[in-house]
Amino acid sequence: MKIAVCVSLVPDTTTKIKVDSDNKSINENGVSFVLNPYDEFAVEEAIRTKEKFGGDVTVISFGTEAYKEAIKKAFQMTADQGILIKTSSKNFDSFTVAKNLAEVLKTENYDIIFFGKQSIDYDGHIIPSMVGELLGLPAINDVVKLNIEGTKVTVEREVEGGKETIFANLPAIIGTQKGLNEPRYPSLKNIMAAKSKPIKEISPIEIEPLVNVKEMRLPPVKGKGKIFEGVESVPELVRLLKEEAKVI
């Protein structure tokens, strides 16, 4: 079975983020970057699928030279080969990423393509569906359970207020959610083996972004809380909720 998994590199959630002087990007000084956590579920499921049905796993990423680190992490989890669609620009939107991934994916007849349901930096939640549309393939996101029988897949996905079951035919795109599996810890043997696996670099398709960042800013610092006691303070509480908090 030919399996692909698309991954991204994102800031570590424990890293303190600062907005750069252009007010349109983050200041990367001192920022730690990691494989997108939702993509770890995608890589794990891709490897489990390979272990069950045979075949190989190709890891694909769109980004700068630094994005090789995301591919290397997938190598440590025993993915087989990697492709970096290498760009020097950091000014790209979700459509640019989806279009470039789709162009690479359509060059091979992949049986199944895995994504994390979303990246934790922009939280767009749209790239799996975009790639599915561009390739004309069924795309199912937020998947917490997957079963493959021949050329048919049965998935369970999270929806607001519950879960739903969807049936589809391969090839298909699966967006993975927490709960689908438990990503493995790389062994020392696999960490060493990952160092010798080559990453193929290809040039991106240059696309004018459909979405541009106008401004980036941190949330306002929370002020000190106020404590009200007694029924007589209710009018003042209502006034503040209406005039200051503007929630009523």
Image: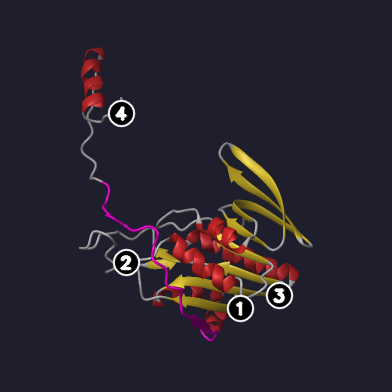
Residue 25 placement, left or right of 4: left
Q: Is residue 168 above or below residue 107?
A: above
- Residue at horizontal 69%, vertical 48%? 166
Mark-to-mark CA distance, 4 and 2: 35 Å
Secondary element at tag 2 = loop
Secondary element at tag 4 = loop
**Residue nearest the observer in this picture, 139 or 18:** 139
Q: Is residue 225 above or below residue 202?
A: above
Secondary element at tag 1 = loop
Q: Which residue is mark 3?
A: 55
**Split into 4 quadrants, where in the image is the C terminus?**
top left
**Residue nearest the observer in this picture, 238 or 100:** 100
Q: Which residues are magenta?
A: 195-219
Mark-to-mark CA distance, 2 and 3: 36 Å
**Residue type beneath disc 3:** Gly
* Lower position in the chain sequence, tag 4 or tag 1: 1
* Lower position in the chain sequence, tag 4 or tag 2: 2
Cβ–Cβ under 8 Å for marks 2 and 3: no
Mark-to-mark CA distance, 4 and 1: 53 Å
Q: Which residue is mark 2?
A: 31
Label at residue 80: 1
Q: Which residue is mark 4?
A: 247
* Lower position in the chain sequence, tag 3 or tag 1: 3
